[in-house]
Amino acid sequence: MKTIIGKRSHKAGLPPGSLVPVGPARDAKINLTVIDYDAGGFNQMEVERVEDCLPYRDTATVTWVNVDGVHDPELIRVLGEGFGLHPLTLEDIFNVDHRPKMEDFGDYLFVTLKMLYPGADGEEIVSEQISLAAGRNFVISFQEAPGDVFQPVRERLKKASGRIRSRGPDYLAYALIDAVVDQYFLILENLGETIESTEDDLIKGTEEGVLDSIYLLRREMVLLRRAIWPLREVIGGLEKSESELIDHSTRVYLRDLFDHYLTIIDAVEIFREMLSAMLDSYRSIISEKMNSVMKVLTIIATIFIPLTFIAGVYGMNFEHMPELKQPWGYPLVWLVMLALAGVMAVYFKRKKWM
Amino acid sequence: MKTIIGKRSHKAGLPPGSLVPVGPARDAKINLTVIDYDAGGFNQMEVERVEDCLPYRDTATVTWVNVDGVHDPELIRVLGEGFGLHPLTLEDIFNVDHRPKMEDFGDYLFVTLKMLYPGADGEEIVSEQISLAAGRNFVISFQEAPGDVFQPVRERLKKASGRIRSRGPDYLAYALIDAVVDQYFLILENLGETIESTEDDLIKGTEEGVLDSIYLLRREMVLLRRAIWPLREVIGGLEKSESELIDHSTRVYLRDLFDHYLTIIDAVEIFREMLSAMLDSYRSIISEKMNSVMKVLTIIATIFIPLTFIAGVYGMNFEHMPELKQPWGYPLVWLVMLALAGVMAVYFKRKKWM
Amino acid sequence: MKTIIGKRSHKAGLPPGSLVPVGPARDAKINLTVIDYDAGGFNQMEVERVEDCLPYRDTATVTWVNVDGVHDPELIRVLGEGFGLHPLTLEDIFNVDHRPKMEDFGDYLFVTLKMLYPGADGEEIVSEQISLAAGRNFVISFQEAPGDVFQPVRERLKKASGRIRSRGPDYLAYALIDAVVDQYFLILENLGETIESTEDDLIKGTEEGVLDSIYLLRREMVLLRRAIWPLREVIGGLEKSESELIDHSTRVYLRDLFDHYLTIIDAVEIFREMLSAMLDSYRSIISEKMNSVMKVLTIIATIFIPLTFIAGVYGMNFEHMPELKQPWGYPLVWLVMLALAGVMAVYFKRKKWM
Amino acid sequence: MKTIIGKRSHKAGLPPGSLVPVGPARDAKINLTVIDYDAGGFNQMEVERVEDCLPYRDTATVTWVNVDGVHDPELIRVLGEGFGLHPLTLEDIFNVDHRPKMEDFGDYLFVTLKMLYPGADGEEIVSEQISLAAGRNFVISFQEAPGDVFQPVRERLKKASGRIRSRGPDYLAYALIDAVVDQYFLILENLGETIESTEDDLIKGTEEGVLDSIYLLRREMVLLRRAIWPLREVIGGLEKSESELIDHSTRVYLRDLFDHYLTIIDAVEIFREMLSAMLDSYRSIISEKMNSVMKVLTIIATIFIPLTFIAGVYGMNFEHMPELKQPWGYPLVWLVMLALAGVMAVYFKRKKWM
Amino acid sequence: MKTIIGKRSHKAGLPPGSLVPVGPARDAKINLTVIDYDAGGFNQMEVERVEDCLPYRDTATVTWVNVDGVHDPELIRVLGEGFGLHPLTLEDIFNVDHRPKMEDFGDYLFVTLKMLYPGADGEEIVSEQISLAAGRNFVISFQEAPGDVFQPVRERLKKASGRIRSRGPDYLAYALIDAVVDQYFLILENLGETIESTEDDLIKGTEEGVLDSIYLLRREMVLLRRAIWPLREVIGGLEKSESELIDHSTRVYLRDLFDHYLTIIDAVEIFREMLSAMLDSYRSIISEKMNSVMKVLTIIATIFIPLTFIAGVYGMNFEHMPELKQPWGYPLVWLVMLALAGVMAVYFKRKKWM
């Protein structure tokens, strides 16, 4: 729940651009990886100090700095100032509760995304913020924690033959965003399977726990939508941006990415409809059960209450009850009672209660 | 369910434009049909090798290449490169889970659609992806499996007199899309009939299975909407496109096609409203039944419980119960009980429970 | 139901502009009426052959051709070609399941509308398609069957003093559309009265048949909305059209017509809200009744079940039941039972169940 | 209800601009008040004949003609023609069922509004149509019946010091609209109070009549929205109008008026949400009551039915029932029954039913 | 509730710009604080008379006048006229029920906001109106009551090093709005916690009071949305304003503020969805409970009613009941009854009612 609205209140009153941690504190060491490449060469290195990244900034080659952790304000500040990032950008990177967005600062484009991956227990979705700043010849990417989502991009960069090596930082940024969006498909597949199996449970009639599953799924959908929905503005904004930082040949890939976004949103909407249909279905099943319970009660009660009344009548101790004296009294009462039960049964059959 | 969000996760990390199969694998042989025509001549042939299509590309006549199967990445790649298609186009053709869309690549227009036809068992709707690339003097169409949806277009091309022969590839592409859209009317008619008969069942009171039917229909509507809804952008995009590939005289046909689209969407929306009204109706019927069940129970119980109590009283074994000794005791009790039942009945009549 | 999505499937594959009947077949003779007028003169005649209309086309006077029936493709084709109508226009005229629309073909404006009138039994709404083509000096109107909706326009044309005589075909087309829209008010009044009387039934508590009425009304609203909603584009399109066929002075009348449209749509929306409020109300009444039924059952059962138990206890046949021997036993049991019933009654009074 | 869709059907077929009464007939005398003013002077008079107004039209001073009644077509026609109003404007003035709208006729601006005031019995809202035509140096206002809503404007005009005297007819028209809109706040306050007191009733549990109140309020909201909603186009249209009849300095007041409109719409929306929340709340309360009724029934029945059964067993008349002979039989049965009741009670406590 | 639509009716008829109190009367003394600063100097003083503020207006330094109270029309009028504010602005400042808005008066920008803070009892949200007028070299801020929300801004102004000192009044206005918006996060956190704890209560099954909490929360959401929603136009309007009063460098901060707004609106929407899901959940839990209550009732009644009937039969006093004489009669009846109960139990097990 804490992800819905972070603890930002203690920031109230501070000047904008202040770097105060918003997410949970982390002590992990921050890894800085610098990849420097062009069509001709590729060079990957781990650097210890932020200052070691800066020389690559001014080379003609494309420089990709990846930062595995955003819990050190000083590091972000130094790196940001080195690459000419605006204080508000630094605040956005630092504040891991941010809404996905794209912003054009003239010298660089800034993109914030949510990376989603299944949690350790395989059930809950974990959300992590990814920030990208793409300038004229550099891309800086920030992850909340070390992860391997960008590994395939690195692999493609290593191979001299790939298209990616001959393109600029705009294409690299596109590739990184694409890697994040590809993860969403994985999440959606998992969700789809959970929804399917819950639906099967519902149909099979094992409705215990189904309600909880549906509510859990609905809640995950809310979180999912929150991460995915604003991508429309991010990807659409990049595609339609008039920034000269985005090459014309990259736009067709961004358009493709936007199609992926639309496919994801379609799936999310369909899941929502399915969940709401399942809830409807669940309620109908419950009310139908209730109905059949009521019918059984009514049939039993309606048949036996009058019979019990008759038995009660002849259990009365009046001295003058002539029927009691007759030898045919007892069999006749049985006959009457059976006839009554039969009439009731026919009535219920006609009413389709039985 | 697999059609909602395909297994794309194993593509995560691959460069865009990679041709990795998304749909189920198929081993069927792929048929390539080439039709070459202009106002003066018509020539149809089956070709064995992809390379045999390419010579027709450069002729002044209109060339239509139809490919019956998209499970062979190599074939698609060779054909695509031969006709100058962008790698992302090839990926879209190959990936049969794509959302319908229209894209203008300058040299050609690319359109992806869903073809819908009733399944073998006559119940479920089967969806198949149709892709079209329309260039200056060629149209390439891709189907997932051999089918006869384009047969009428072929017939019209054969006839020397038809309007279609004297038009360019834009009109051919329009005719192919029109053939696909015409199929939707068939699907909608079937759906309409199923909805009608379900409604009749509901009115006749045979409500068993009605709920399942409604949920099945709702689900088909979701899939249908997913296939049809994006057509707005596809057809509207073609109509409003500024591409010089679309002749002015074709636009009036595209506008007509857009009207068909609107008619279909209207029908889909009306079906949705009818389904939701049927669900409402179903629930009201169920709750009304419940109500009448409850009333019967209440009437029976309310009449007999007090009577049984009276009988119980005179079944007590106290030694000093003067009533028991009186000869009029028994008849009087009967009178009291009948009077009580009568009062109750009048009460229920007034309350309109009986 | 057949009006929701007509049988169009047998048209699949035919070239656009094919004139295949969509509506039910009709054998009635088709009447052609030609009215030729200008400020100075008025001339009305019935013509036998289509060809007889054509000479009027080229006169300077305004020519109005009214066709009472669209089931003869040949007639429509000859007339259409005589007046220079596009094949798609002819198809739209012929296909009486069309969605209302306005289209500008340069030489003429084409409008399709639904005429609504109460059915023979006074309950169901019947829908008929009206098509209009308005050119530089002619208007052609098509009705599905002979009707008198245009009679008042004819009367106004006859009178030499009317404004309509000195205006062009655009004003005539406006007058014809206005005549159709005026009919909608009649339909809405009828609907409004039915809704009111249903509401009265609901309030008076005679809720039998109310549910059916509401569902019938809802269904009529769906059909109504389908006919009326697209008028926004039709009338708005005419008003904002840049076609030189529409004189500036006519636009103010179109604006007025658009106001009528807004009034109608307002009424439709209010009816929808009223119907949904009535459904809500119906459900609340039903559940309140259920509630009161349950209360009666509970009161009766809760009071008498314990009393019956007490009576049952003293109906047991144990030899050693000292109470049974006491002369005050029987009266005391009565006292206890009355006290118990009294306590229960007070409890129910407090709970407001009685 | 008659206000939802007026009896317009008998107008069907008449030429537009025909002055046929739509509202109820009225015989009251129509008062014409002429106020002629500029910064220097103020002159108010009652005139007998319409023709007496016309001389003021051509003076340089601002002329305000107020007409208290629109049931005399002849009067409206003469006045309208005298001031150069379009026949459609006259029809709109005459037809008191019109949707609020603003229209620019070049020489004058025409505005139709609904004036709302609480009915005589203080419950129902009464709606009356106000029409305004504002030209270069005149304003004509039409009310359905004499009323004092414009009295404060008259007072301000009388005072030489007011801003209004030095402004043109556009400001006067604004002031009149403002006076009407100010009335809406009064209506909303009353509604707000009724909603509040209904809510209090609901919370206090006196839910009798609450349902009726809610439905009545919902219905008033529908009528209210119908009157208020179109004001967006009226006031927004005036503010954004490019007509030279509206002075730049007046626009800031129109913007302010638009803010009032937004505040009113906000309140209406909040009322709607509150009403729907109250309905929800009502239903929850009802179903909770039902629940508690059911619980009481279940507790009583579940405890006593088994006990009654035991009593019944020992009321059987078998000759060989050894328990009946034992002196401890009766006390033991009591013990068993008490123990059973105790177990049940504990079970219900645990289930939180008691 | 009074905050939904204030008592404005007694203003009806007054000229616009009239300063009539709308909120509750207050007698508190109004504090005027003037802060005069530029990059070089900072000067804060409390002034007694309004006239003492005016000299600062014409200095080149930025002047911030803060007014702690708006219940003195005379003070507002003098101050407003001194700084050249429009009468409508003064009315808006004075009327504390205003909808948040931004207005460009050319010489100054006017902004009205709602400040929200938790009430004294920590439960209810209190809303207070903040108005800002930002001119070429001054900002005037109005609060309804003294408060410390602007204190941090004052602190930052005091520090010579801050960015804020070297910026103009536009940045100061931004900083003040930012301070107000930061408060919203605090409110949202509190709300989030209340929602969480209510949800926990719901899950734990202590559903007493949960319904009330949900309705209270829903109501607070309505008020919250009313305060926050119009901010889109306020902040977006400032960001996109073409006023020269807003420096280009300030726009990036306004964009950042707009992001905060979006985050807040996201949270509000998620809260709404959570509340509605909780209501759904609550209803499902209630109906499930009802269901289980009904099942227990049915099981008990259905098992014992037939048994009681059997016992009743053998409690009848017929003279000729052969079974009663048999020594095996009593044990056999017991056997039959146990068998019947067993069959019932198996039936219920199968139906999953037990």
Image (spheres, coloured by chain):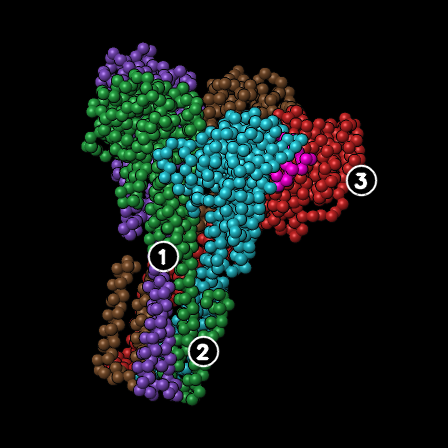
Chain colours: A brown, B purple, C green, D cyan, E red
* Figure quadrant of residue B149: top left
Q: Is residue D189 visible?
A: yes
For image coordinates 62% across by 50% down, the residue present is E124
Residue D134, above or below B312:
above
Crowding near the residue tagged with mark 3, few <14, some 14–19, many ≥20 C-alpha atoms within 10 Å: few
Q: How far apart are marks 1 and 3 (CA)?
A: 73 Å
* Residue type at the position of mark 2: Leu
Judge if badges 1 and 3 mark residues of a common chain. no
Eye-nearest disc, 2 or 1 = 1
Q: What stretch is highlighted in magenta?
A: D152-168
**Residue C338, label in figure:** 2
Q: Mark 3 points at which residue?
A: E48
Q: Which of B4 and B26 is in front in this view?
A: B4
Judge if badges 2 and 1 mark residues of a common chain. yes
Residue C341, above or below C211:
below
* Residue type at the position of mark 3: Glu
Eye-nearest disc, 1 or 3 = 1
**Residue C206, label in figure:** 1
Q: Is residue B154 magenta?
A: no
Give the x, y percent position of residue A338.
25, 70
Q: Which of B189 and E159 is in front in this view?
A: B189
Q: Which of marks 2 and 1 is nearer the N terminus?
A: 1
* Figure quadrant of residue B10: top left
